[in-house]
Image: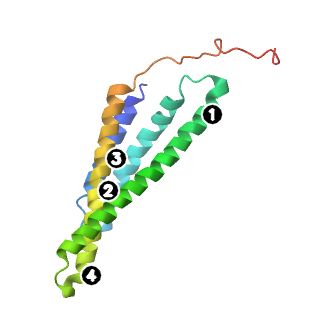
Amino acid sequence: MAPRLLMVPGTVLAAGGMLVLTRITVHSPYASELLPALILIGLGMGLTFMPVFATATAGVAPQDSGVTSATVNTAQQVGGSIGTALLNTIATTTSTAYIAAHLRDPARKELVIREGIVHGYTVAIWCAAGVMLLAGLAAGLMVTTKPPRHTPSDTPVPESVG
């Protein structure tokens, strides 16, 4: 099966879940608004990650498979850390600007702060959904099914083995 047949729908599902999250408010109930979004994101990521890792390590010579797998895993960890930091920066910057612009009545301070936090996360989630859709587009256009470059018969056997 072509990996993109799982990657593209997976990224679309995850982005769809993120788009559902952009509709939350301070008073959004968990079961009807947050849970469906989280389920969509989880299903989408589940469909996406397995073929991403399989594609990244496909065709690698057996003696290089450990290094390749470790590199892919490291890239995922570093990318996740950078992505989280970037989205947090977007969320906090946007929240701060929202609160500063809307905090006029001291009696509404608590509500404005809550609305500002939700607004900041909403903007960050819009950005994350856009990145997810771009990843799906890249997977759809660039990921192809090719036979592995190295087959067991192509791999040289060290003299010490034979």
Q: Earlier in the sequence, mark 3 or mark 1?
A: 3
Amino acid type at image mark 1: Val
Cα separation, mark 1 vs mark 4, equals: 51 Å
The CA distance from mark 3 to mark 4 is 32 Å
Residue 25 at what x, y percent from top left?
A: 24, 67
| Badge 2 vs badge 1, beta-carbon distance below 8 Å | no
Q: Earlier in the sequence, mark 3 or mark 2?
A: 3
* Residue at 40%, 22% in the rendered image: 144
The residue that mark 3 highlights is 14
Secondary structure state at the residue bearing disc 2: helix
Residue beneath disc 4 = 110
Q: Is the Cβ of the residue at disc 3 closer than 8 Å to that at disc 4?
A: no
Q: Is residue 114 above or below residue 154?
A: below
SS at mark 4 in the image: helix
What residue sits right under mark 2 in the picture?
Answer: 36
Residue visible at 38% across and 30% down in the picture:
4
Amino acid type of the residue that numbered disc 2 sits on in the rendered structure: Pro
Q: Is residue 62 visible?
A: yes
